[in-house]
Amino acid sequence: MHTVDATQLIADIASLATIVEPGSRGTTRRAFTDAYRTSRTWVRACMQAAGLDVHMDAGGNLIGRYPGLRPDAPVIMLGSHTDTVMEGGRYDGAIGVLGAIAVVRALQTHGMRLQHTIEVVDFMAEESTPLGSLIGSTAMAQGFSDEFLRRQVPDWGDVASCIASMGGNPNVLTRALRTTGTIGAYLELHIEQGPVLEAANVPIGVVTGIVGIRRCDIICRGRPDHAGTAGMHHRHDALAVAADVIRAAEHAAHARPGTVATVGALTLAPNQTNVVPGYVRFSLEMRSVHWPEVVAIWDECMHALHTAAAQRGVHVEVTPYEDSPPLTFAPWYTALVADAVAPWSPTVLHLPSGAGHDGSMIGLIAPVAMIFVRTKDGRSHCPEEFAADADIVAGVNALLHAVCALDQTLG
Ligand code: HGY
Ligand code: MN
Ligand code: MN
């Protein structure tokens, strides 16, 4: 049974982890930053060194191709993302891109030319920024509205300019870059970012699907006033409105086991001890594997927002910018992945993903499956994020075997 070059893989993960925004804690390499641009130059070179023909598509996705014997057959697509959250970890996304490159390196080393072309993709801007998330995979599988491309975001600019700054071409992104039938199957290796595999004491697992996520941006415009002389009944306190929404989101998710809701980003003005906040901008997201629960949490939060705003004479603007419905992976595909995982794990565990992934967009045009790697303490999106080398190597070897099985299975 062929395996990948573990030494090179672990070295690649360590090298990529050095390319971060200066002065940041953990691994910070946000989309559209200079550090991200530098890292993609490194990823392109890594792909080329592994024998991949590399190009960037109009959505800013870096794509390395390893041609198959049947050039007209649908491709087998592997990949993930290399952008990170603020003060994140070095494994989220990175092991999926570098693991896929390691798989192609192994195919080359063992002189294996498959029937299907392999595409290794570093999807652009998977992580959530004020511009949105899943930018590259949405460009590939769905396209954007003109309104979304033109949306102006303070401190970031508009989406189209940001995509162009990474080498993409926003002028052709109002329709999907790829269509159903061109990708025979998409397979992503990723850290679990949760506690399940560690609790079961297994290194890798088979993912059954991806959670549904709704995200929006909310602006509250009240009135700045003197904190000492503005009576409590005369205030238009924007932050008090946001506080009601934060409590409502927490309460609504607690009431629905298995769901989550988060206000993760918030800015206020003038942000001064002795001034009543006149302006607040914050994010709101909610997730569930059952979409009606996402909608129910949304409705409770919107009711709390508009009630609180009316009570305080505060004007609110709500901009929904992401609705990715839950995705359940096809049983034929999770069965194939389970067979590939089995040699590398004492038991084969199936589990859903509470994290979002590019696969939820690629699932619009191709079958999707994922392999998870155990995450220490179930923690991610923080400097403490950790996955053991042996577990990562087990996951990439399972990825290699799933690719070979796909090559035999796909038409
Ligand atoms: O937000 C998520 O679940 C993913 O890490 N982008
Ligand atoms: Mn992430
Ligand atoms: Mn990720």
Image (cartoon, grey):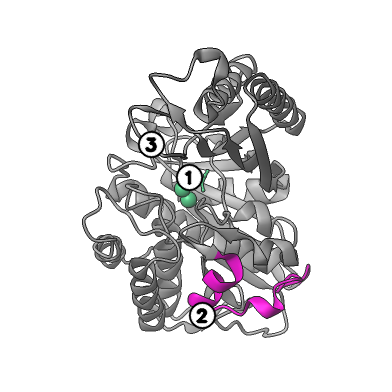
What is the x, y in percent for residue 355?
53, 41
Q: Earlier in the sequence, mark 1 or mark 3?
A: 3
Q: How many residues crowd mark 1 within 10 Å: few (<14), some (14–19), many (20+)?
A: many
Looking at the rendered structure, the kind of residue marked 1 is: Phe
x, y percent for residue 258: 60, 23
Disc 3 designates what residue?
271
Calculate the distance from the C-alpha at mark 1 to the C-alpha at mark 2.
31 Å
Labels 2 and 3 touching (C-beta < 8 A): no
Snapshot quadrant of residue 107: bottom left
Q: Which residues are magenta?
A: 158-181
Give coordinates of residue 216: x percent, y percent: 63, 42
- Relative placement, left or right, of 394 versus 255 is left
The percent position of residue 22, horizontal first and vertical second, equals 23, 61
The question of residue 174 being in magenta is answered with yes
Q: Which residue is mark 1?
A: 372
Residue drawn 60% across and 82% down?
Answer: 68
Quadrant assignment, res 346: top left
Residue type at mark 2: give it.
Gly
Q: Earlier in the sequence, mark 2 or mark 3?
A: 2
Give the residue displayed 42% in from the left and 47% down from the top.
Answer: 344
Q: Of helix, strand and loop, which one carries label 3? A: loop
Viewer-side label of 1, 2: 2
Disc nearest the viewer among 2 and 3: 3
Q: Is residue 405 visible?
A: no
For the residues labelled 2 and 3, the Cα–Cα distance comes to: 37 Å
Residue 284 versus residue 75 in the image, above or below: above
Mark 2 surroundings: few (<14), some (14-19) or many (≥20) residues within 10 A: some
- The residue nearer to you, when weighing 217 against 297, is 217
Other-residue count near label 3 (Cα within 10 Å), few / some / many at <14 / 14–19 / ≥20 = some
Residue at left offset 56%, top offset 14%:
233
**Residue that numbered label 2 is attached to:** 167
